[in-house]
Amino acid sequence: MAKENMITRARDELFSHINRCGVLQAEEEDQKHWMEETIDYLAERFPDLTDNDLQDLFSVGIRFCQPAIPHGRKRFGFDPREKAQGPLPATDSEVPIEAPTEVAAEVVTEVAAEVVADVVTEVATEELVSQEAGAENTLQES
C-alpha cells in the first residue's frame, strides 16, 4: 500500500473512531488520553507509519475534537468543572420581580377586558341605531 494512501486511511479511521466513540463531548484531558490510546492502536494497525505520521494524526485528531464552533455544553459557556454557588443573598434594596407568566397573564387579562368592553360598546351602539331606525320607520308610517 502506498504511504499517502496509508496515511489517508489511518486519518479516516481516526475520524470514524472519534465520531463513533463520543469523544467530542468529553473533557479535554479525557480527549487527550483517548487520543493517545487510539494513536497507539493505529500504530499497531498501520505499522509502516512513522512517529512523525503518528504525531501528525494525533494533532489532527485533537484539532478535530476542538472545532471553531464549540458543541455540547461548552457551546453555551457551561463548564462542568465549575460548581454551582447557590442563590445570591438578597439585599434590602432588592424589589421582587414578578414571574414572566404572571406579568403576561395580567397583560392578557387587561387586553381581553378592553376587547370585551369595545365589543359591548359596539353591540350596544348597533342596537341603539337599529332601535332608532325602527322608531323612525314607525313615525314615517303614521
Image (spheres, rainbow, N blue to C red):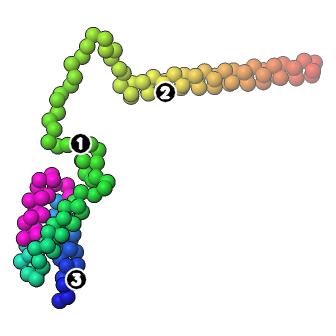
Circle on res. 4: 3
**Residue 22 shown in magenta:** no
Q: Quadrant of residue 58?
A: bottom left
Q: Amino acid at mark 3?
A: Glu
Chief secondary structure of the magenta portion: helix
**Image x and y of residue 8, in percent:** 23, 78
Q: Quadrant of residue 129?
A: top right
Above or below for 111 versus 60: above
Type of amino acid under label 1: Phe
Q: Is residue 129 left or right of residue 29?
A: right
Q: Which mark, residue 108? A: 2
Q: What residue type is disc 2 on?
A: Val
Of badges 1 and 2, nearer the viewer stands: 1
Is residue 132 placed above or below 27 in the rendered structure? above
User: Secondary structure beneath disc 3?
Assistant: helix
Q: Which residues are magenta?
A: 24-40
2 and 3 marks in contact (CB < 8 Å) = no
Q: Position of residue 68 (x, y in %)?
A: 31, 55
Residue 20 visible in the picture:
no
Query: How far, Cα to Cα, is label 1 from label 3?
Result: 40 Å
